[in-house]
Image (spheres, rainbow, N blue to C red):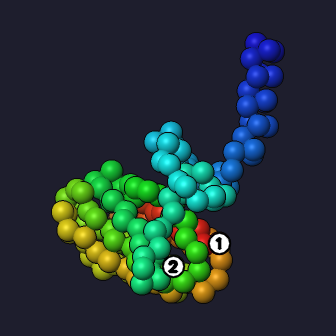
Amino acid sequence: MRARLAAVAVLVAGSPALSGCALWGMEGGPGGQGAAVASAAPTADPAAVQAVMGADGVQRIEITVDDELRLTPQVVAARPGRIEFTFRNAGLTPHDIAVRVPAATGSGNINGHTAGVVTVEVPSPGTYPMPCLYHGTSGMRGTLQVR
Ligand SMILES: [Cu+2]
């Protein structure tokens, strides 16, 4: 019994070493699935997926939202500038995703099997929340990391 308690203490003490944990609330951060997403660009959060810079200078990222109230990817990395999000609803439950940079720009209602586009101008680095206005309190929120 004493040895088991010691092992638990070591696990707890070791968890701050995992980067990005502080960003996530009770529902936890990206799991194994998120960690498996490849990202060529160096980012602080290994689960972050880099928005792709277009020839027009606009960074673009497509995020799938679903009936399990997930955003995939949940963490997006980008550089300061214009970023265009396409939120594609793979399920039936409507969503409304806001990107707070820091003023909120919302996608508007996204019905099942449709998509909503949000374009924001982010002047400076920072970590910006992307909550679903319907399900944010249920843990449906992504994160934009600009650096
Ligand atoms: Cu939602």
Residue 122 or residue 26, whichever sits in front: 122
Q: Nearer the viewer, mark 2 or mark 1?
A: 1
Tell me the amino acid under the disc marked 1: Arg
SS class, disc 2: strand
The amino acid type, in three-letter code, at marker 2 is Arg
**Does any portion of residue 131 appear in the rendered image?**
no
Q: Tell me the quadrant of the picture where the C terminus can be found.
A: bottom right
Tell me the quarter of the picture where residue 60 sits: bottom left
| Image position of 143 with respect to 59: above or below | above
Q: Mark 1 points at which residue?
A: 147
User: Where is residue 47 shown, x and y percent of the image?
Assistant: 55, 51
Residue 117's spot in the image, x, y percent?
32, 77
- The local crowd at label 1, few if under 14, some if 14 to 19, many if 20 or more residues have their Cα within 10 Å, is few
In three-dimensional space, the C-alpha distance between marks 2 and 1, rounded to whole angstroms, equals 16 Å
**Quadrant hosting ligand 1:** bottom left
Residue at the image position 59 percent from the left and 68 percent from the top? 145
Q: Is mark 2 within 8 Å of ligand 1?
A: no
Residue 104 in the image: above or below residue 62: below
> In the image shown, does 64 or 59 lie closer to the viewer?
59
Q: What element carries label 1?
A: loop
User: Horizontal and vertical percent for residue 27?
Assistant: 52, 49
User: Which residue is identified by label 2?
Assistant: 100
Instruction: Judge: label 1 CB < 8 Å from ligand 1.
Output: no
Residue at (76%, 37%) from the top-left corner?
Answer: 14
